[in-house]
Image (cartoon, rainbow, N blue to C red):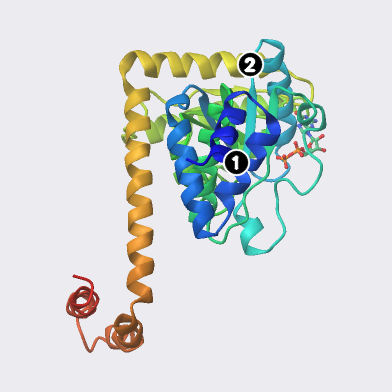
Amino acid sequence: MPATDQALADGVRRRDRRALAKAITLLESTRADHRARADALLDALLPHTGNAVRIGLSGVPGVGKSTFIEALGLQLIAQGHRVAVLAVDPSSSVSGGSILGDKTRMEQLSVRDEAFIRPSPASGTLGGVAEKTREVLLLCEAAGHDVVIVETVGVGQSETAVAGMTDLFVLLQLPNAGDDLQAIKKGVMELADLVVINKADLDPAAATRAQAQITSALRVFGQQGNPAHGTAAPVMQASGLKGEGVAAFWALVMQHVEARRASGAFALRRQRQAQDWLWDLVRNRLLADFRAHPAVKRELPAALAEVSAARSAPSVAARRLLQLFESNNS
Ligand code: GDP
């Protein structure tokens, strides 16, 4: 590794914010030479990663995510932690605008030396955004952040991506969520390791109702056999604005982490995530190569049309295309 990049790695390790920001810029670059340098940097820093509690946090816009994260972050810093907040915002690549991070958020947290807040990378697909965020997460760990929160919005597939890079996935709900359980997407509920009824101060009675309804809904999901949960995920109430329930939240997070560490599930989830990450990259790259292959490119529209019109079996069409691809790739 060139001396300047070694200095960058050392800077990240020394918790120099500018070095961390520069390293992230290098990772997010699309230039091939930058990518090679970023890979070397990640390799060098990898032994210093893995030590954070990685928390995924999702909820619809306005549920109070940034308010909650700020209250939590400030409390954790007071206890001696260093907190990083990253965002996965699929809207930033689709519309050019973002749901997360366009306004000045977490004003008190962002000025703290012990905090590092990074908006969502805006690189094309959700897969691309998630990919960069995973790498940034590692850099933040190398820079001594022992709590990393990856925030996302309740739209699209971003929750699955965030749950796939964190140790536990938290869902923030509004107090009226229980009134309309249809509105709660079952798939997302199944990802949740912890559900927080936020803004409980607004309507304590509704919050208590929502807590009971979501608790029983989760039990039903649990009974249907969510392998991630031996038991149903806990449901709690909080008010990020008033700072209520934030300490209790952290206690539940630590309880979850300790229990998973003791059972081995914690390490297993990380191993699986690391393998999935590798396969994601290989799959995406192979697919891109396949689509870019001249003969495949030429034949693909006709093959798709044939398959759509039921004039050829998908399996036969796929095999033909793969043969074209492999014939000048072997
Ligand atoms: P986000 O879009 O999920 O990040 O939501 P924000 O944190 O930006 O909060 C949206 C609005 O709800 C803001 O006006 C906050 O002041 C308000 N808010 C956030 N948390 C609470 C809470 O616990 N109680 C009440 N009453 N309002 C809150």
The label shown at residue 81 is 2
**What element does badge 2 sit on?**
loop
Residue at 73 percent across and 24 percent down: it is: 239
Q: Which residue is mark 1?
A: 23
Q: Is residue 276 above or below residue 139?
A: below
Where does residue 323 sit, x and y in percent of width and height?
A: 18, 77
How far across and down, in percent of the image, does residue 125 sit?
53, 60
Contact (CB < 8 A) between labels 2 and 1?
no
Q: Which x, y percent locates residue 161?
A: 47, 46
Q: In the image shown, does 52 or 172 lie closer to the viewer?
A: 52
Q: Nearer the viewer, residue 300 or 160?
A: 300
Q: Is residue 135 visible?
A: yes
- The quadrant in which the C terminus is found is bottom left
Q: Secondary structure at mark 1?
A: helix
**Of all residues shown, which one is farthest toward the top?**
79
Horizontal placement of 156 versus 256: left or right?
right
In this picture, is 325 found above or below 67?
below
- Dividing the image into four equal quarters, which quarter contains ligand 1? top right
State yes or no: Cβ of the residue under disc 2 lies below 8 Å from any atom of ligand 1: no
Using the rendered view, name the quadrant where residue 210 is placed: top right
Closest to the observer, 309 or 18: 18
Q: Is residue 307 above or below residue 247?
A: below
Q: Residue at x 33, y 55 (%)?
A: 282
The residue most toward the front is: 3
Which numbered disc, 2 or 1, marks the residue that appears first in the sequence? 1
Question: How many dots with numbers?
Answer: 2
Q: Residue at x 48, y 54 (%)?
A: 127
Which is more toward the observer, 68 or 270? 270
Q: Amino acid at mark 1?
A: Ala
Amino acid of disc 2: His
Question: Above or below — where is 217 with respect to 208?
Answer: below
